Amino acid sequence: MKMRKTLLARAKTLSLSGVFIVAGVAVLPLAAQAQSFQSSVERQSLNRVVAVVNDGVILQSELDDRIAQIEQQAQAQGSSLPPRQQFASQVLERMILEEIQLQMAENANLSIDDTELNRQVRGVAESNGMTLDQFADAIEADGMTMAQVRNDIRREMLMRQVQQSQVGQRVSISDRDVDRLLNQQSGGGQQAFIEETRARHILVSLTPTRDEAQARSRAEQAISRLRQGEDFASVAREYSDDSGSALNGGELGWVRPGQTVPAFEEALTALAPGQISAPVRSQFGYHIIEVEERRRQDVTQESQREQVRQAIFQRRANEELDVWLDEIRSQAFVDIRL
């Protein structure tokens, strides 16, 4: 520790609890110096920069924390992981994409209101059948804090805002698009009724840690448990990778023709109420679909057109999102130091 006083003209040596002060400078014994140096090196290694992303950085400690989370999830699910170096590179790429989007949110002065954040947190707790206090206790039991969870949810909401604003600008829908889908739904007539299906699903997606065969096998495991009589909602919460519906037991609500990708819609249409599909492959992974009930909904022509427009928008936006993510990654300055 450097003394604030001017160095003494004549060296003075004082012994004080194993610490020596020589010429006004604190000097540790050699063994203590070695231990201190080792700790310093370990701290620097832990917090070294593993990626520079534009004006931001990702630290080794942040990467290690994310890897530990994924490893814990994989262990709980019985999934295998790629070799460590390959896996770390894949996780880092995901974090780089997140960092780019969060920087875009900051540059656009986007923010999440505390009221909105509280509503989202409360919704997550309620979808798990918990009060906020019970939710906080469950989080602490998993070794996390409510502050960490709130921060994670805030980050997800910011990235969703960026995606909605950026990808939304790239999707255009003409009246002809709406007319074409309306004709498909109504057979070309002007009927004021449309068939809706209330459904739920489990999505097993392909990830850096799960290839095609593993995804298919995991979907089959979920179906096996459903056939043994397990509750669909419980299996969905455990197996589904669709974060938007998993916490709600896989519930999709009332779905109309054109709102889902073709493979999903084809399987959905073929099912009778109460039936569960075999694994259905789409660009998002493997779906397990259950039809709960169907109804014919009376809608006005104006509202029907708006609902059809929203269905087309959602489908095209999902397709455009992957393209946009590739673009912002290629345009960013990224220096990987892993």
Image (cartoon, grey):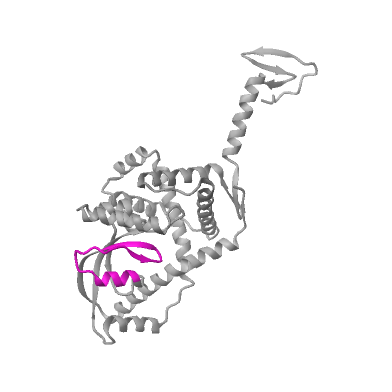
Q: What percent of the width, then of the height, locates residue 52? A: 61, 51
- Residue 273 shown in magenta: yes
Q: Residue furthest bottom?
A: 189
- Residue 248 makes an appearance in the image: no
Q: Residue at x 34, y 80 (%)?
A: 181
Q: What is the residue that sits farthest to the top in this orientation?
A: 15
Displayed quadrant of residue 174: bottom left
Q: Is residue 323 above or below residue 81?
A: below
- Taking the image as shown, residue 21 lies to the left or right of residue 67, namely right
x 76%, y 22%: residue: 7
* Bounds of the magenta segment: 263-289
The total number of labels drawn is: 0
**Where does the image place residue 162, in percent across and percent down from the top left?**
48, 62
Q: Is residue 163 left or right of residue 272?
A: right
In this rendered view, identify the residue nearer to me: 154 or 223.
223
Left/right placement of residue 223 relative to residue 60 reads left
Q: Residue at x 66, y 18 (%)?
A: 29
Image point 56% across, 38% down: which residue? 46
Please provide percent x and percent y for residue 295: 20, 72
The relative height of residue 12 versus residue 227 in the rendered view (above or below) is above
Whether residue 270 is visible here, answered yes or no, is yes
Compared across the picture, whether 192 is left or right of 212 comes to: left
* Image quarter hosting the N terminus: top right
